[in-house]
Image: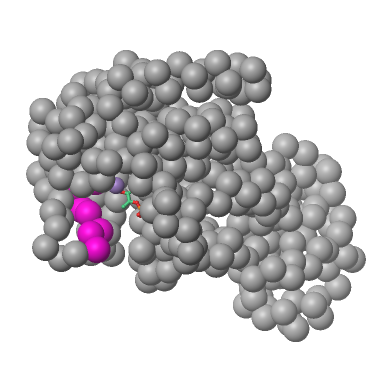
Amino acid sequence: MVIVMREGASKKDIDELIALLHEVGAEAHVSQGEFRTVIGVIGDREKVMQMPLEAYAGVEKVVPIMKPYKLVSREFHEEPTVIKVRDAEIGGGHFNIIAGPCSVESEEQVLLAARAAKAAGAEFFRGGAFKPRSSPYSFQGLAEDGLKMLAAARDETGLPVVTEVLDVRDIELVSRYADVLQVGARNMQNFLMLKELGYSEMPILLKRGMSATIEEWMMAAEYILKEGNKKVILCERGIRTFETATRNTLDISSIPIVKGLSHLPIFVDPSHATGVRELVPPLCRAALAAGADGVMVEIHPNPREALCDGSQSLTIDGFGSMMEDLKGLAEYLGRK
Ligand code: PEP
Ligand code: MN
């Protein structure tokens, strides 16, 4: 349930209420809105319901949340969450672009891609140093050497780095080099890792599992928020359907649905959703028009030689012209 405090409820009222909730063994998550404070209560429902909450000073109303996730929900936090990463802001009206190669392959490849991303107006740079590959014989990534190359690209371009953490044992290592930790589709329900990331202060880009419902995805995010880390960015990357023309089917409807359910920002990854370079620009436009907070796209200085996902990677020129188109559409839609 959430307890909505009156406008102007005092800090003393709020602290006393939290202390009472702790006494019955409940967790209290405080969300400070512009006008009022909302307290998300998680604990033994029976015990909490026995408390005469509405009679306490400063309490306006008590709203039960029937959903299996609470902190992620709009009921708990009405205003959109805005996440600051270095100089960039995610959510709250901005439309951000994360661009970069599927995998980090060499110093030269990373620098060429990062310079191109920056020149075209991307605000974040991506690249995988730990790759979740379907075949154990495929290129698995350069690990820490790759992370160092990403950090060097950030030093030159100033673009914050988004990179995947594949294993709970690598969280500390990846956090040393990255600005945003990506949880890949295959790890969306790695609950132990999600919990561990909940203790972290790093922003998390949480991809939707390829067979996950929207509700399962929201619950995955809840695992992270529940442990204290509120900086979660959702990323729709397509789901498995019977369709074979694309690698996955981009669920564009998830954007307005998630916007209604949650205050968290939502990105779209049309590269992994389609697997087809030509489909990336139209689906980026669709994501922007549908209200997404940004897109993540794969680019490569020479896609034909890419060690991973070359067929879905935009060329540097292709990325540049897509960005021009997106700027025009963003202006038309009144987005930044
Ligand atoms: C990626 O973004 O590098 C990736 C592997 O994507 P996904 O987890 O969505 O398949
Ligand atoms: Mn990829």
**Which residue does the image show at 53% across and 62% down from the upper left?**
217
Residue 25 pos. (x, y %): 62, 77
Magenta residues (range): 126-134
**Which residue does the image show at 41% across and 47% down from the upper left?**
274
Asked whether the viewer can see residue 179, the reply is: no
Which residue is at the far right?
A: 55
- Vertical arrangement, residue 118 with respect to residue 89, above or below: above
- Vertical arrangement, residue 194 with respect to residue 8, above or below: below
Q: Quadrant of the C terminus?
A: top right
- Vertical arrangement, residue 108 with respect to residue 106, above or below: above
**Which residue does the image show at 35% across and 36% down from the upper left?**
277
* Front residue of 236 and 307: 307
Which residue is at the far bottom?
A: 46
Asked whether the viewer can see residue 216, the reply is: yes
Report whether 260 appears left or right of 183. Answer: right
Report whether 173 appears left or right of 239. Answer: left
* Front residue of 255 and 203: 255
Q: Is residue 133 magenta?
A: yes
**Which residue does the image show at 42% across and 50% down from the upper left?**
246
Report whether 75 appears left or right of 107. Answer: right
Question: Residue 64's quadrant in the figure?
Answer: bottom right
Q: Quadrant of the N terminus?
A: bottom right
Report whether 61 appears left or right of 37. Answer: right
Residue 250 pos. (x, y %): 51, 49
Residue 240 pos. (x, y %): 46, 62
Q: Is residue 313 magenta?
A: no
Q: Main secondary structure of the magenta part?
A: loop
